[in-house]
Amino acid sequence: MLNELRMKIEKNTVVSLRYKLTDAQNNIIEEPDSPMVYLHGGYEGTFPKIETLLDGQDVGYEASIQLEPSEAFGEYDPELLKIEPRARFPEPLEVGMQFEGVPDAEDEGESADVDDEPLIYTVTDVADSQVVLDGNHPLAGMALRFWVQVEDIRAATDEEIENRHPEGGEAFAFGMPDDSDDGDDEFTGDVSKPGNSSPTLH
């Protein structure tokens, strides 16, 4: 027990972290009731700057840190805005819905990385015949402030290390809407299907 209390955050430990996420003006973006749980040590479970801050700390440690857009979700890229025919989408269609898609075919020559994760597009505007989609993360272009507090630390299992995430923790993401309702409507096109799980935090 004493050993567990003294355990420090290091590579291949699973960390339970309470956090509050605000913008640069201290407007609250997220303050969940449950802690996030991630595998520490470069597994892309959280932002590198937060991992560096937490490295070597123990239970009870708390701190505040600001991340610039380049350290969080990147700068806003206007190239990721798409206008698509409304007929290719399922109904009912509402602003805020999310769909999983792939880059445009003409871009494939330059970015032929098959391993790239498909973008999540958010519907930002709906007209009679067209739909505006934004492939930027909802928090792209924003400086973010985090308050974090370490709630628990434990050694990761071999399986968790092999899978590169804690058991049951693969779908965690900061700042992403919770798409827990069933969204299984399909339609044809580059943007293919409602995304039930948000991309993991990078």
Image (spheres, rainbow, N blue to C red):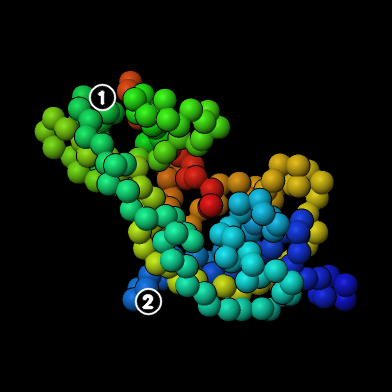
| Number of numbered discs on residues | 2
Q: Position of residue 60 (x, y in %)?
A: 68, 78
Q: Position of residue 106 (x, y in %)?
A: 34, 25
For residue 19, above or below residue 114: below
For residue 76, above or below residue 193: below
Q: Farthest residue to the front: give it.
A: 110
Mark-to-mark CA distance, 2 and 1: 39 Å
Which class describes the residues within 10 Å of circle 2: few (<14), some (14-19), or many (20+)?
few
Q: Nearer the viewer, residue 202 or 156?
A: 202
Question: Is residue 192 in sight in this rendering?
Answer: no
* Residue under the image location 52 percent in, 74 percent down: 65
Which class describes the residues within 10 Å of circle 1: few (<14), some (14-19), or many (20+)?
some
* Residue under the image location 53 percent in, 52 percent down: 201
Q: Position of residue 52 (x, y in %)?
A: 64, 67
SS assignment at label 1: helix
Q: Dot 1 corresponds to which residue? A: 88
The amino acid type found where label 2 is placed reads Asn
The amino acid type found where label 1 is placed reads Arg
Question: Is residue 69 in sight in this rendering?
Answer: yes
Q: Is residue 47 left or right of residue 73?
A: right
* Residue under the image location 37 percent in, 29 percent down: 107
Q: Nearer the viewer, residue 26 or 141?
A: 141
For marks 2 and 1, the one nearer the N-term is: 2
Q: Quadrant of the N terminus?
A: bottom right
Report which quarter residue 29 is drawn in. Answer: bottom left
Q: Dot 2 corresponds to which residue? A: 26
